Image (cartoon, grey):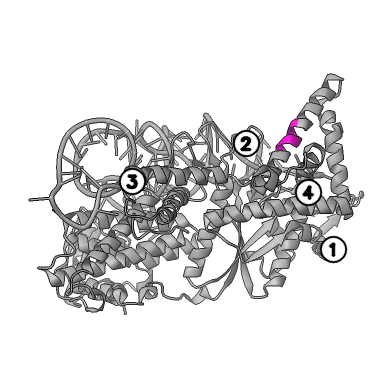
RNA sequence: GGUCCCAUAGCUCAACCGGAUAGAGCAUCAGUUUUCUAAACUGACGGUUACAAGUUCGAGUCUUGUUGGGAUCACCA
């Protein structure tokens, strides 16, 4: 039984005996005592003064007295206005620390929760196959991957899914441009990554299209007419129809170009260090949804208009009527999503949650999607969750692929690694590294900087990226945290040189030492880890973990600066501090793993 | 126009259910290295939390309004 809970029970007891207030101990919440006051936990007594009929100060003092004299948890308390600050016996902190520091006991820090035996699918990335990935995708991918890791950490079974948008008019655009304007160019011949090659033709299409529109407008067409009549777009639409009829030539071209793109994406995913358990292709799923539409028509949830189009009326929900099927019987975007959601719950019968990592511009879409499933009375409708994240903007505003202002994912990663390389060489950190090891390090650092930079920001917020300013490596950054880890590893290597210290892991640390303030702060922060993970999991928010691990690293660096860890004359202290350092390192590593960031043992 | 989201230090970001004097980093300035990695540490500077009212013991956080920014409301995806 942990002391925090015992303490809550004592406080509940105090409230009952002193004031006749009945409260469930679990409903009491502590906040961490602020640094400027003495104490570990703080309880706010304002909510009780109505019933205690005494001033906040008196109420707090009486409660403190009661708890102190009726248990051995506290060594003292103090009262500031309505805040009761409680000081926990160091011994209890040390006992807690020993319990987590035991070898192989790391996972006890996350107790299994009752609702943890759930299967959840996290869909992320979900790229179009007509252009390479950019910074916006990176945010999506890192979020999806990290959230998956966090959910696994709290015991859920996670299926990482990717729905690849491999069909449609935009795909035909790059196909058509390649067909018309290429000169046998392939990834091999051009030395271009497949996705970039295809993206190049998508751009070429757009240029030609624009030119045709201009010419048509010169001959008197309106812009709207021109956009519809431009020969190249007409041809692309023909190609889409041919694709839908499985025209052999078009299919062959489509398969070839998609293969190029997949190879390119695979490479990007690999460098990002992410993967998927299940791939869905829109070319397989785009016709789904018609069954559901039929179902909805049968039970009167949807209705058909005279022209044959199918709609759902969402005016009761404060929305509008929404089209689900065109008058020509073809499906629209949302009908596909209706089908694919249904498919997933069929594919995975144990699935009870489906998280879509999709930008906030699609909030309306997912709102509609969920309401429709509710109307259809699908039992799992409540398990649908749109993990909506904000855009990544540039100082100049939105990234626009047509204006060439997108920050390319591959280029950005390359730049990050290059910056890491320059920085590390300048600091002279890799003189005893082999060239291959150094490259591995540069990659870890560059990617660490990038990933941390993105994940530390609350997902729902729009964030800014300035390409002119390179992502930092000092301060609140990935490399700072990586550095903290490497430092600890270095200390532990040093300890291995002392006979009395080298097996410090196995020596039980004493529980009777007086903790120094900075030692205690670290233990207290370690104590918060399970809660941080829990909050991150319930809020689907990697930024909680990023903030947590940064604070931990900062605490440790300050401690490290002030106190010698390996000291042959102070064996007991050294052993304790080595254990504290190791525990910090493992927690740092675990947090970074949850963020998808690797930590180096030397840097 | 309707609906939704956002607004915190010069810049980029924090702040768990409403809790104490709103915190970090960058930038600027001043310090710290014969000691385990200075990608570090310590300090200074920097704020009417866009504005106005309300709710209450207490509001960056909740409510309403105003201003400014963004998204969305397609027989596009």
* Helix, strand or loop at mark 3: loop
Query: What is the CA distance from the residue labelled 4 to the residue labelled 2?
Result: 20 Å
Dominant SS of magenta comes to helix
- The answer to whether residue A60 is left or right of residue A312 is left
The percent coordinates of residue A249 (x first, y second) are: 87, 51
Q: Which residues are magenta?
A: A203-207
**How many residues crowd mark 4 within 10 Å: few (<14), some (14–19), many (20+)?**
many
- Of badges 1 and 3, nearer the viewer stands 3
Residue A30 is at least partly visible in this image: no
* Helix, strand or loop at mark 2: loop
**How many residues crowd mark 1 within 10 Å: few (<14), some (14–19), many (20+)?**
some
The percent coordinates of residue A428 (x first, y second) are: 31, 46
Residue annotated with mark 4 = A168
Query: What is the CA distance from the residue labelled 1 to the residue labelled 3?
Result: 57 Å
Discs 1, 3: same chain: yes
Q: Chain of mark 4?
A: A
Residue annotated with mark 3 = A475
- Of badges 1 and 2, nearer the viewer stands 2
- The answer to whether residue A32 is left or right of residue A349 is left
**Among the 4 quarters of the image, the one containing residue A14:** bottom left
Discs 3, 4: same chain: yes
Residue annotated with mark 1 = A294
* Helix, strand or loop at mark 1: helix
């Amino acid at each position: 039984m942990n002391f925090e809970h015992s303490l809550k029970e004592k406080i509940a007891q105090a409230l009952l005996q002193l004031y006749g207030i009945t409260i469930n101990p679990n409903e009491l919440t502590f906040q961490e005592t602020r640094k400027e006051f003495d104490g570990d936990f703080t309880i706010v007594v304002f909510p009780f003064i109505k019933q205690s009929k005494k001033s906040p100060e008196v109420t707090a003092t009486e409660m403190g007295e009661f708890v102190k004299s009726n248990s051995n948890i506290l060594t003292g308390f103090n009262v500031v206005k309505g805040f009761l600050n409680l000081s926990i016996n160091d011994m209890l902190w040390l006992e807690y620390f020993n319990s987590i520091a035991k070898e192989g006991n790391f996972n006890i820090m996350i107790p299994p929760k009752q609702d943890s035996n759930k299967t959840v699918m996290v869909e992320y990335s979900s790229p179009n196959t007509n252009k390479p990935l950019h910074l916006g995708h990176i945010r999506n991918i890192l979020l999806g991957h990290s959230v998956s890791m966090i959910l696994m950490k709290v015991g859920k079974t996670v299926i990482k899914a990717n729905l690849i948008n491999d069909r449609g008019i935009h795909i035909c655009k790059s196909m058509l441009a390649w067909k018309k304007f290429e000169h046998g160019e392939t990834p091999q011949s051009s030395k271009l990554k497949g996705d970039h090659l295809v993206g190049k033709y998508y751009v070429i299409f757009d240029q030609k299209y624009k030119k045709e529109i201009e010419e048509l407008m010169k001959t008197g067409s309106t812009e709207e007419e021109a956009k519809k009549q431009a020969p190249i777009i007409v041809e692309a639409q023909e190609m889409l129809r041919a694709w839908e009829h499985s025209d052999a030539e078009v299919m062959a071209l489509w398969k070839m170009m998609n293969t190029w793109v997949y190879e390119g994406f695979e490479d990007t995913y690999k460098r990002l260090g992410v993967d998927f358990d299940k791939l869905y292709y829109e070319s397989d799923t785009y016709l789904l949804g018609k069954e559901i539409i039929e179902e909805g028509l049968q039970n009167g949830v949807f209705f058909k208009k005279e022209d044959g189009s199918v709609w759902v009326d969402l005016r009761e929900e404060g929305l509008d009527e929404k089209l689900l099927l065109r008058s020509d019987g073809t499906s629209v975007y949302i009908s596909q999503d209706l089908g694919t959601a249904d498919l997933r719950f069929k594919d995975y019968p144990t699935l009870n949650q489906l998280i879509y990592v999709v930008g906030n511009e699609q909030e309306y879409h997912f709102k509609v999607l969920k309401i429709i499933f509710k109307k259809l009375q699908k039992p799992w409708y409540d398990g649908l969750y749109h993990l909506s994240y904000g855009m990544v903007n540039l100082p100049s505003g939105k990234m626009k692929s047509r204006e060439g202002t997108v920050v390319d994912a591959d280029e950005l990663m390359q730049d990050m690694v290059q910056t890491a390389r320059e920085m590390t060489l300048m600091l002279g950190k890799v003189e005893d590294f082999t060239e291959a090891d150094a490259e591995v390090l540069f990659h870890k650092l560059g990617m660490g900087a990038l990933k941390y930079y993105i994940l530390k920001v609350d997902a729902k917020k729009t964030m800014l990226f300035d390409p002119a300013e390179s992502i930092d490596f000092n301060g609140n950054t990935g490399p700072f945290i990586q550095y903290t880890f490497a430092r600890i590893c270095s200390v532990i290597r040093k300890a291995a040189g002392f006979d009395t210290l080298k097996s410090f892991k196995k020596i039980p640390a004493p529980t009777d030492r007086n903790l120094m303030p900075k030692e205690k702060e670290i233990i207290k922060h370690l104590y918060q880890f399970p809660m941080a993970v829990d909050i991150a999991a319930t809020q689907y928010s990697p930024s909680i973990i990023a903030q947590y691990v940064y604070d931990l690293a900062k605490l440790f660096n300050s401690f490290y600066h002030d106190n010698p860890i390996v000291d042959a004359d102070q064996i007991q202290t050294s052993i304790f501090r080595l254990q504290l350092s190791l525990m910090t390192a493992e927690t740092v590593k675990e947090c970074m793993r949850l963020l998808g960031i690797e930590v180096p043992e030397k840097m």
